[in-house]
Image: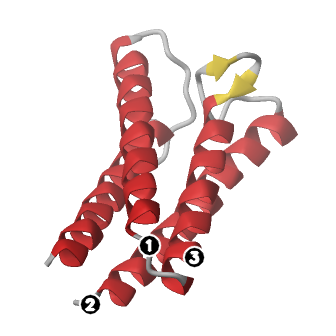
Amino acid sequence: MDAKAYTKAIAILAVAGVVFSGYLTAYTYASGRPGCEVFYFGLPSCLYGFIMYLLIFTLSTLLFIAKKGTRAVAMAVIALAGMAFSAYLTLAIMNNTSCTTFDILGQPPCVYGLAMYLVLLLVAISVLWQRKS
């Protein structure tokens, strides 16, 4: 797979992340029930996910237009930060037995956010690897 195909894959995954976290954010605000169990500075954690996915999409679009290795590095760093944040949230919610979180197929949303960030990180690393060779 060439670098453009990887970049397109990152953009598609980032759009999926924007839709997923955007839905959870809208659900949280519209229903008054938490789509995201954890709040930071009064904002639901899924809103931070939305911002991070939007950044990854923007960087992937810029990477597609202009081939700059620093954008791929920035994308990998953002994906890594998002993965760490989602892992923290997943552990915090899974360890809380009194948690009343919104479930998707029996799992809290942050589990799926973590999986999406992991895939994004792997694809971003593949882009970096491809650019070095």
Q: Is residue 78 toward the left or the right of residue 120 in the image?
A: right
Pinpoint residue 1: horizontal percent, then vertical percent. Answer: 22, 90
Q: Quadrant of residue 29?
A: top right
x 78%, y 47%: residue:
26
Q: Nearer the viewer, mark 1 or mark 2?
A: 1
Pinpoint residue 79: horizontal percent, then vertical percent. Answer: 41, 49
x 77%, y 18%: residue:
42
The CA span between labels 1 and 3 is 11 Å
Q: Nearer the viewer, mark 1 or mark 3?
A: 1
Residue for badge 1 = 68
Q: Quadrant of residue 85?
A: top left
Q: Is residue 43 toward the left or the right of residue 93 in the image?
A: right
Residue for badge 3 = 61
Residue for badge 2 = 2
The one of 52 and 95 positioned closer to us in this rendering: 52
Residue type at tag 2 = Asp
